[in-house]
Amino acid sequence: MKKQIYAVATLIATMLVAFYGILLLDSSERDRDIQNLQSQMSLVVDSRAEALNDWLQAQYAVLGALADNASLQLYVTVIGMSGANQPLEEDPAERDYLRNLLNAKAEQFGFLPERIAAKLPANTRPLDTAGLALLDPTGGVIASSDGMPPIEGRLKTFLDDTPLTEHGLLDLFPGRGTHPTLGFLAPVFGETEEGKTQVIARVLGLRQVDERFFGAMKQPGLTAKTAESYLIRRDGNRIQYLTPLHDGSEPLSKTLAINSERLVDVAALSEPGRFHEGLDYAANACFAVSRQILDTPWTLVHKIDRSEALAQSDADRTTLFSVLSLVLVLFGAGLIVAWRYSTSLRAEEATREAERLAQRYKESSERFESISRFLDIVTDAQPHAIFVTTSDNTLSFGNERIAEISEIPKRELEGRSLIGLLGQERGSAYNAINQQVLATGRPIRETSRFADQNGQEQVWRSFHCLLETQDGAQPRVLTTIEDLTDLMRERARRERNTRQLIETLVGLVDERDPDSAHQSRYAAQVARKIAEEMGLERPLIETADQAARLANIGKVRIPRALLTKDESLSEDELRIVRQSLDEGPNLLKEIEFDGPVVETLRQINERIDGAGRPHGLKEDAILPTAQAVAVANCFVALLSPRAFRDPKSFDEAEAILMQDIDRRFDRRAVFSLLNYLNNKGGKETWAEMTRLHGTPRPSSSRDT
């Protein structure tokens, strides 16, 4: 009976765990669906932002073409010479030409005013709502198209606020017609009689925005009923909607408070470029993504109601939950039946058959898993992002790592642009590098620094090379990206810790031996210069610097009384001093330095003639860093006062070092120091070493 109760309890616990697993799977599927939705919405908003930018650039191009028109520049110059304040009825032929040119361009490119009524004759005077105008540098009208409003009020302020040599954008405002008005400004440059280039006029364009502008908000092929793209801007403490909305609001007619709770448009203004979840302008739960439109105060928002966005996903997950639950129930029922049937003799045979089937299934499953793992290893084992782009910077291949970075499923990578994959900043940077590879055919290695979503610096090292193609196929560029962010941060942290540790140890030595205060710092300066003059590589120069700072670390084991004794030391005392200095590097053996710092410290008391300690090394067996530190340490010690002698002068120190060449010191290290002292301003740079101790007195009989 107890076994039966235990079996039933085990079955119930197993089913509860399985139900919990189903709930976790349901939650994971929902998160994945929202992530896919975010990717899809980002593609739409990026496409619409690009369409808006193209539309704006097209308007500037119209004004730029007029400004670059040679005939227009010539006639403006002639009119300026004949007097720009003539009445219109007395205009010369040049003004007629300019007016006709502006009318033609206004009609060709849509800078047309709204007519009073659609059924009135075509020659009826239109409302003064839009057009093109050619202005002199002071804002006076040289010529304008029909329907151009007078230059006053908002237009006058816009002209005054825009620098004479720059392009300008007059933001959307309610005009005299039924549609909002948008203004553009471009300078016209010409040459003076002295041959100098200056602004001779400006072209002002006003156009009413209608479906030709609002059409840029609509994504072709988008079927979602609640999906909507619109422009917003901040107007004081309110959000103003610039384009028509699904609730029937006309452009510029709808505003909401900037502190509206959970409003996605508030988040879009404060953090453009992110994914938002909250309420839309109609208080419906929605998802949204936003983008800032370049060189405008506008933010583009693309939103979709949450109910529609997740409708199919919710249905699929409900079906999946139901099916899995039913399977689990059936599985539990089957277990109960099998358990009861196992009490009979026939159940035993069924169990044996089930075991044989399970073994065959296991073997087949293991073979399949082995093949799958092999394929995964071949395609996705690399830790770095790998992708191939065509000449138009769209992906033709990407591995699993680039899919993780872009948060886009691997199966959806092909055909995407680099900007859509990596974002505006990274995508534009790699686009430029790939175009350079395509142009030159040479591979490029580049280390780039970007800011992540939290403003932290990211360091990426990339390699770009041209892939050879055959049969006239489109050229492609292979790119690999290695994320060095964690490595750079860890290296900087380790370097900081090493510097702090060295400074702490140096301070401890200086406290115990007041005669050698500042010696470690000076020795490090001298050792660095010697290493540089010897032509050592950068890591060895840093090793010499660090070792020089720690050269006296063994003094922490020397009794303070010996360090400050002003009499000659006995042989036993000298033995204690030398032994402590030789064992000093052992205090640092557990510290990881980037260079051979500890080994350098062990060799600074070796002599070039082999008579040094502790191992009697000679000549090239002694590290060059140890040779540099030994000379530097001796040089600084000679310049420093001791309890038993006065400091040496530069000349005296040089003479002593020269005497020890090829005996105690290597000639390269000594000559490198002397070269810096006498030929590169070393004595002036290090004059403070002697000034800190006063004027040197004649040296005593005791040497360093």
Image: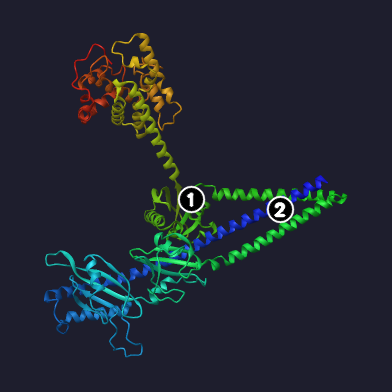
Residue carrying label 1 = 385
Residue 68 showing in the rendered view: no
Residue 416, percent across and down?
A: 47, 61
**Type of amino acid at the residue the image marks with label 1:** Ala
Between 651 and 441, which is closer to the camera in this rendering?
651
- From mark 1 to mark 2, how far is it between C-alphas? 41 Å
The residue closer to the viewer here, 330 or 58, is 330
| Coordinates of residue 50 in the picture (x, y in percent) | 40, 66
Q: Position of residue 318 (x, y in %)?
A: 64, 63
508 left or right, relative to 691: right
Pinpoint residue 384: horizontal percent, then vertical percent. 49, 48
Nearest the viewer among 17 and 201 is 17
* Mark 2, secondary structure of its residue: helix
Q: Residues within 10 Å of mark 1 (few under 14, many from 20)?
A: many
In the rendered structure, which disc, 1 or 2, sits on the residue that comes first in sequence? Answer: 2
For the image, the number of numbered tags is: 2
Q: Is residue 473 above or below residue 7?
A: below
Q: Which residue is under mark 2?
A: 15
Q: Amino acid at mark 2?
A: Met
Q: Left or right: where does residue 380 sit relative to residue 327?
A: left
Residue 290: name its quadrant: bottom left
Q: Quadrant of residue 680?
A: top left
As helix, strand or loop, the secondary structure at mark 1 comes to strand
